[in-house]
Image (cartoon, rainbow, N blue to C red):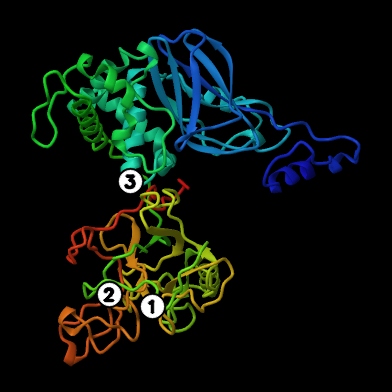
Amino acid sequence: MGGLLLLAGLTGCLDGTIVNWAMQDRSRELPPVADNLVLVAISGAPSGAQVRVFAGGEAIEGVRVTEQTAGAFRLAFPGNTAFSGLRVEARWDGGQAFGVIPSVPRQRSVICPERVVACLTGEDCRSYHDALAPECREALPPAVMPPLGDVATAATLTLLGKGIDAGGGLASFACVLGDQVEEFVARFQGSDPDVTAFVDLVRGWTALAGREGKYPFVGPLGPGAGVEDLADEAFLQAFAAQLPAPPTGCGGAEPSVPPTPGDQRCAFASLLRAAAARVTVLPQPATDRVRVVFQVDFRAGAKDGNCTVVDRFKWAREGSGKRVYLTGGIHKTTPICGSGATAPFCLTQQQVDEANAVLGNWVPNLREMVDDGTQGDTVRGDGIWTFVADLPAIPLEGSPHGIGVRIGYKFTYGLPGQGWTDSEEWPGNQRLLELVDVNGDGIVVRRDVFGDEATNKDKANQLLPSNGGCGGVNLWETDPAPAACSRHLHDTRERPVDLDGDCVADGWPQAGSVAPIFLGCD
């Protein structure tokens, strides 16, 4: 049996078609992988309530609702798949409720029976966990989660909104979701005014759930959805005047009488964020790697560092079917372990090789960027292309040399597999970027303009001296500026950018649904 367990443990996806060689019977197949169960209690729901489970903004296929009765049901998840940061929704004629499922682990072996992995019932699932054979248990017992109702719905919306504002969703905090729900419930029970106000709003809205077939809160979420989008537009259009009056206006303005959909939506978002600020449990950020978001403005009329319109096709050639790509690699000035630098203030050669592969290793037109509102892209089709990469990090605090991970990169506009000719933004140079989280949001976001030769280009840099240029070169932050260039502005880290086209840096570039790397959450 030990060989069988070893086989199951090494298999990336437990599959019932694996031949049972450990029992020397090649005519038999292993049994199908047993389901993982989540028990749900729900206040006031009839047996025919519609139930969906969402991962991100989309409903999961393959999850079955079983043993559904008035006020309770079971969710059966396929045992060969792991899930995290889930949102379960029930709606019926007269009600709507949400709950959070922090995680559903994959079955540990094909010999393990159907098992309960979480309870949204207010009870401790430990008894189910302890009844399993040791080889079928998880490292930690399931978390205690409240039954679906007004408080659980408010907690779910609060944490989902908190995740959206952090650039992700519930999965952004999957490793601490159980603790966050517990803190929310405790604050509500302790009459925290911000949490109570939001629960009251949710209770008032769900009192009208199901009327005319409309529900107050959305199920699926589209790309780039914000906190305000959690409130259903059709519901607000129909019932805004019948909902409880918003307690405050937005932006200092008093709400209309009767309240408009805009008033209600704004109050919803404001109260949600106030409640979210009361949830202080956060996951531990990773320190050995960082999520980097590269953005390049490929719009006609975009301006360079000298406030001059860039000629996108000075070196690249316009053509049908072409797309925007990024390529690059670890810069030679990054400290390498064993070459006068010691951990953790250096990269190993393996880390260098892996990062180079992620960045395309200077192969043009290989790592495609996106402009479709997904994968960190903020707005579909706005001409700003995005590429997200998880890269190694070197701490600056305590570093004897003060140098972080440095990369060189550039953009191309070409066809898949095309060479440099007629595709690169300019030849013989590279952009410089040191992976330092300057604004403290947990990610590094760098926005550039395609073909801009007056920005973080290393050589032949055309930034004018009046704008901080220095002899046609761009220096790293630790490099002293030559005496003749006393006001030289280094441009090798993330920085604010011009967001409104007036050539004045007025804000940090925002990533789409991208969250920092948290330990145990990805």
Label 3 to label 2, Cα distance in Å?
Answer: 26 Å
Binning the other alpha carbons within 10 Å of mark 1 as few (below 14), some (14 to 19) or many (20 upward) gives few
- Rendered location of residue 400, percent (x, y): 33, 77
**Labels 1 and 2: the sequence-earlier one:** 1
Closest to the camera, between mark 3 and mark 2, is 2
Binning the other alpha carbons within 10 Å of mark 2 as few (below 14), some (14 to 19) or many (20 upward) gives many
**Which residue type carries mark 1?**
Lys
Picture disc at residue 491: 2
Q: Residue at x 12, y 29 (%)?
A: 249
Q: Is residue 276 above or below residue 120?
A: below
Picture disc at residue 166: 3
Q: Is residue 115 above or below residue 368?
A: above
**Which residue type carries mark 3?**
Ala
Label 3 near label 1: C-beta < 8 Å? Answer: no
Q: Residue at x 70, y 48 (%)?
A: 10
The N terminus: image quadrant:
top right
Label 1 to label 3, Cα distance in Å?
Answer: 38 Å
Q: Is residue 62 above or below residue 362?
A: above
Q: Residue at x 64, y 35 (%)?
A: 107
Q: Is residue 488 above or below residue 519?
A: below
> Camera-side residue: 508 or 181?
508
Q: Can the viewer see residue 198 in this picture? A: yes
Label 1 belongs to which residue?
A: 314
Binning the other alpha carbons within 10 Å of mark 3 as few (below 14), some (14 to 19) or many (20 upward) gives many
> Camera-side residue: 414 or 143?
414
